[in-house]
Image (cartoon, rainbow, N blue to C red):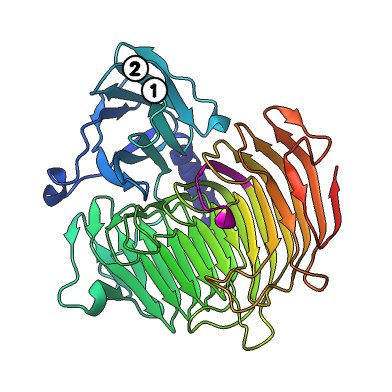
Amino acid sequence: MKKIKFVWGLLFICCNLWADELVIHSIPNEIVYTRHNNDFTVQVRLPGKDWKDLFEYNVSVDLDNPQPASMVQFDFSGKVEMKVRVNNGMIHQVNIRPAEKQIIPLIKNNTILFSLDKPVKLSLEVNGDRLHNLHIFANPLETEIPDPKDPDVIYFAPGLHKPKDLPGNAFRVSSGQTVYLAPGAVVRGKFACSHSENIRFLGRGIIEEPERGFELINCKNIEIEGITVINPMHYTVYGGQTDGLKIKNLKSFSCRGWSDGIDLMSCSNVEIDDVFMRNSDDCIAIYGHRWSFYGDVKNYDVKNSILWADVAHPINIGIHGDTKGNGNTIEQLNFSNIDILEHHEDDREFQGCMAFMVGDHNLVKDVVFENIRVESISEGRLFSARVLFNKKYNDAPGSGIENVIFRNIFYNGSDENESLIEGYNDKCKVKNVLFENIVINGKRIKSFEEGNIKIGEYTENVRLN
């Protein structure tokens, strides 16, 4: 009998996975009139069913001149059809990015039609406008909804939530707790964890304009999944001396100074999967010691993600470390299957889509970038691997960069500034760097000159295959 029950249970799960299902998120009344963007009218449906309206959420993007863009999201399985009406102006051109998704829409007058057969995160851009675009987050169905009556669950139901008289507008979370933001929940306040462990943040809700989205200080085994963070004052995820961090299906927008995406200081054993980060500072930054956080850095797996740096770096590694000691070792970092939709940084000292800025006696080693697609560099460098002494942020130069692989890197666009691989002196070198299958504008480069890559001083064994 137990075996029969198991088989029927397995069949039920499989049928649910194959079935077409669509979940629309509710919107709190307080949000409807204050956060709506009217640039687009967006609808979604299961094939042959009635169209369902989505709420076009206003999100601010870009630091130099913040602009109102749009965002919609929903959950589904199977197949859905989407209809996007452009409310202001005529359609001359439509791009849906990442280009790797190969979504070609049908355009009828001022309406854009296309279908989706799997969860995806997209930017829909009309007439080349990337500042007033439509972000589409088509999430997978939720697989876990905790019981709101569970004493270890902090449950945010649909509606607007504000911390009442809490220091720093923070929701404090303790060890062993699960925080659930239901679809339609909007939270105005940060989630703070300190010296705690085994905490999970789940759901499809939104954290809106907090100081930080998640503040993780001296923690262990933290999970973040499914949540959207809109325009924090500073970081979306601020991690210090935390071991064991899993981030999945996180979406983020920011438009202020120092409003990085995921900044991790002396953190190890980190998995970042299927995130969308559009930030006006570094999207993902990996550091050693900074402020009150100490320790080496080890074992990162960053994959299946979309990074969009309106300012600064999509990926930045190594600038902060412990100069009172011997610096920090930052090692075993893997980046794979990533789409970079923008890199725009006018300060040459801080340029680089895939950037090593190694200072403060740090040694960075054993790093792999593989299957990375870069679609736009408005201003910046494709590669930057530098051991340096940045007087603004460093107290000493870095110790070195060793054992780096750039494999299957694809870039389409112009490249104003040359990539740079450069050490600091005879003792602080860049060593053992392999470039393999670097394709620029459809052509596999056969020399560093073809790829506009400068191999500077104090380098050793930098190769191109």
x, y percent for residue 398: 69, 72
- Please provide the residue range marked out in magenta: 337-350
Q: Quadrant of residue 82?
A: top left
- Note whether 282 is above or below 64 in the view shown: below
Q: Nearer the viewer, residue 399 or 297?
A: 399
Which amino acid type is shown beneath numbered disc 2? Ile
Q: CA distance from mark 2 to mark 1?
A: 7 Å
The answer to if 349 sits in the magenta stretch is: yes
Query: In the figure, is residue 346 to the left or right of 43?
Result: right
Q: Position of residue 147 (x, y in %)?
A: 30, 64
User: Between disc 2 and disc 1, whose residue precedes?
Assistant: 2
Residue 49 place in picture, x, y as percent: 29, 23
Element under disc 1: loop
- The residue pinned by badge 2 equals 91
Residue matched to label 1: 127
Tally the numbered discs: 2
Is 128 magenta? The answer is: no
Question: Which amino acid, by three-letter code, is at mark 1?
Answer: Asn
